[in-house]
Amino acid sequence: MNGDDQFADVLRANQRYVREFSPLDLGGRAARGLAVLTCIDSRIDPLAMLGMKAGDAKILRNAGARVNDDVLATLVIARYLLGVERAMVIAHTDCRMTAESPARLHEAIRAAGGPDTSDLPFPTSDDQVATLGADVERVRSFDRLEDLQVGGFVYDVRSGALTRVC
Ligand SMILES: [Zn+2]
């Protein structure tokens, strides 16, 4: 089987996209000076929820919208090289990373026919607001990002509404 068969639908869609495409003349900078860290949940459309479009913001995503070393390093690059002056950390309602313990996730992966993942540190939380506050504080207190404005928010996947938490 041709490896592209699994991607035929998206490659076909890309051919249509290319016909309408016009490149952005931004040199990779975020036109609205914003970085957004949010969860990988497919219900979240970060640019649309903020009234933005391609070119406006840097989007970082991981399971649970958690601040980790990779996020901090990426924000440093975004801050000093890509025009970012403010960052939103956006958790969301009905997030599996707040609903289940790491042990339950490891079990669920095994039950789904997956491998033993018990050595993978899944970033779950049993207190979303406290975790969000701690993650925002981690960015604020990072000594290489002192002049970055940071806020913590929760996105409601049912209403589309964003609420500032910290
Ligand atoms: Zn999530």
Image (cartoon, grey):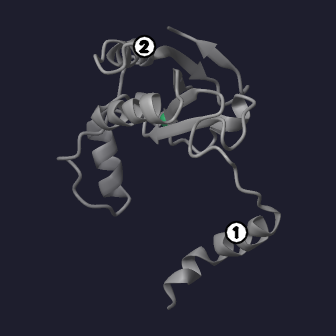
| Tag of residue 37 | none
Residue 75 locus on image (x, y percent): 41, 31
Q: Is mark 1 within 8 Å of ligand 1?
A: no
Residue 65 locus on image (x, y percent): 45, 32
Q: Is residue 104 left or right of residue 29?
A: left
Q: Nearer the viewer, mark 2 or mark 1?
A: 2
Q: Is residue 108 left or right of residue 92?
A: left
Q: Can I make out residue 99 in this image? A: no
In the rendered image, which residue does mark 2 sit on?
147
Residue 23 versus residue 46 in the image, above or below: below
Q: Is residue 93 left or right of residue 147?
A: right
Classify residue 4 by image quadrant.
bottom right
Q: Amino acid at mark 1?
A: Asn
SS state under label 2 = loop
Whether pointer 2 and pointer 1 mark residues with C-beta atoms closer than 8 Å, the reply is no
Q: Amino acid at mark 2?
A: Asp
- Mark 1: few/some/many CA within 10 Å (<14, 14-19, 20+): few
| Tag of residue 14 | 1
Residue 53 locus on image (x, y percent): 72, 40
CA gap, disc 2 and disc 1 = 39 Å
Q: Can I make out residue 147 in this image? A: yes
Q: Who is closer to the viewer here, 21 or 70? A: 21
Q: Is residue 73 left or right of residue 78?
A: left
For image coordinates 66% across by 35% down, the residue present is 56
